[in-house]
Image: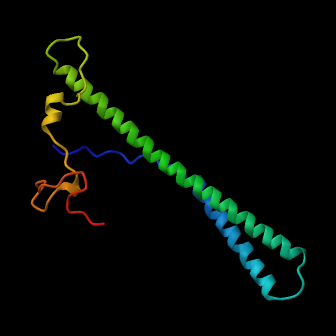
Amino acid sequence: MTDPVRPVPHRPGAVSLFFVAKAGVFALGFWIWLLVLVLSGGEATGAHVLAATGATTTTLVGVVLGARLAMQRNAAVRHAELRRLLVDISWNAFAAAGNAETSGKIVPFPTLPAEDERRSRERVSAFDRSPSGDRAGRDRGGNGDRRR
């Protein structure tokens, strides 16, 4: 059975994207105006100060709004994944309850393997393995084949 087509998660930010673009256009305009004033020469006047202030302010506003937009989109994706996970959990619990041997029991969640099963599986460090996969007689005390 194929996986059903899931809807695209809600992506906020059409209005925010407009304001980020608008701040970028204004910033570009202020920077060009400041560049023209500087290249035309002469003393610094109030127009230079206004252009420099406008350029820095609109640039900072654009950066802040862009960061906010990115965080909103990231939060929307995480929220959609959390909703999907909750639906999967509830569906699995519902299906497991329908398959339960007796009614009215709480369906147990999977638990860790028993202590005997954990002991039978020995963890081996990647440094302790030989190319063939066995431990090759190395010990952890430092007497093995190690680079210094």
Q: Residue at point 19% right, 45% down?
A: 123
Q: Position of residue 46 (x, y in %)?
A: 90, 74
Q: Position of residue 128 (x, y in %)?
A: 19, 55
Closer to us: 20 or 64: 64
Q: Residue at point 58% right, 58% down?
A: 17
**Residue 118: quadrant of the picture:** top left
Closer to us: 15 or 118: 118
As drawn, 39 above or below 85 = below
Task: Please give left or right for residue 82 compared with residue 22 in the image.
Answer: left
Task: Please give left or right for residue 30 compared with residue 99 in the image.
Answer: right
Q: Position of residue 105 (x, y in %)?
A: 23, 13
**Residue 45: quadrant of the picture:** bottom right
As drawn, 92 above or below 10 = above
- Color theme of the render: rainbow
Count up the numbered dots.
0
Q: Quadrant of the C terminus?
A: bottom left
Q: Position of residue 31 (x, y in %)?
A: 72, 75
Q: Residue at point 74% right, 67% down?
A: 56
Q: Quadrant of the N terminus?
A: top left
Q: Residue at point 75% right, 81% down?
A: 35
**Residue 42: quadrant of the picture:** bottom right
